[in-house]
Image (tube, rainbow, N blue to C red):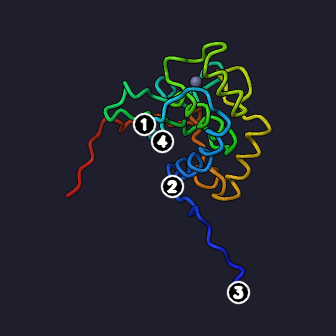
């Protein structure tokens, strides 16, 4: 008998693969915790700069993620973008679970006090305030399980530090290939 057991989730190689795998592993748990009304929107996950977050911040805070509503996307799916400036697995998944919450409860709810989104955050253990994305101990434990299965996000994505960005002079040049 072999002691080797096949993993059901292959180790992701690309950033989006990791995000997809992490969310798929968390979904059953999320939907067991949050049982209030919601949508079953399909979501597209990417790494990318949320609107207005492409430069170094003045006050030290950055927009770490965004979820576009189905009404804002051509295919009617929710579109989540995780800022490439973050790469801590717990931070990234905290953002992912937060943004996924907007898809689940609906964008109209926003961060309304005592609304469905606040119930969602409590249920999935995202710590207050509602605009933040910090996992509490229950969610951290789930993230730990995800990391045990698919490795860390840090291993795939190196943080982008916008404050050290070199100004590019070749910005507008078009490349060609023949
Ligand atoms: Zn939000």
Q: Secondary structure at mark 1?
A: loop
If the image is split into quadrants, where does the C terminus sit?
bottom left
Asked which secondary structure carries label 4, the reply is strand
Q: Give the class, few, some or many, for how many residues have Cα within 10 Å of label 3's Cα (few <14, many ≥20).
A: few
Residue 159, relative to residue 21: is it above or below?
A: above
Q: Which residue is mark 2?
A: 14
Q: Residue at x 61, y 31 (%)?
A: 98
Please identify the quarter of the rendering in which residue 9 is found.
bottom right
Whole-Å distance between the Cαs marked 2 and 4? 12 Å
Quadrant containing the N terminus in the rendered view: bottom right
Tag 1–tag 3 contact (CB < 8 Å) = no
Local secondary structure at mark 2:
loop
In 3D space, how far apart are the residues under numbered discs 2 and 1 (Cα atoms)? 26 Å
Question: Looking at the image, which residue sits at the far top?
Answer: 113
Q: Sequence order check: which comes first, mark 2 or mark 4?
A: 2
Q: Residue at x 55, y 39 (%)?
A: 84
Q: CA distance from mark 1 to mark 3?
A: 59 Å
Q: Nearer the viewer, mark 4 or mark 1?
A: 4
């Amino acid at each position: 008998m072999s002691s080797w057991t096949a993993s059901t989730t292959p180790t992701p190689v690309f950033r989006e693969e990791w995000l997809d795998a992490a969310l798929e592993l968390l979904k059953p748990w999320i939907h067991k915790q949050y049982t209030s009304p919601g949508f079953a929107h399909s979501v597209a996950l990417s790494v990318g700069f949320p609107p207005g977050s492409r430069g170094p911040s003045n006050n030290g805070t950055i927009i770490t993620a965004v979820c576009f509503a189905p009404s804002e996307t051509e295919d009617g799916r929710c579109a989540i973008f995780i800022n490439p400036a973050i790469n801590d697995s717990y931070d990234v998944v905290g953002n992912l679970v937060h943004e996924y919450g907007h898809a689940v409860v609906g964008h109209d709810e926003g961060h309304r006090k005592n609304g469905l989104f606040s119930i969602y955050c409590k249920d999935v253990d995202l710590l207050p305030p509602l605009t933040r994305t910090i996992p509490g101990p229950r969610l951290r434990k789930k993230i730990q399980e995800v990391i045990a299965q698919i490795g860390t996000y840090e291993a795939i994505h190196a943080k982008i530090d916008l404050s050290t960005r070199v100004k590019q002079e070749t910005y507008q040049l078009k490349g060609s290939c023949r």
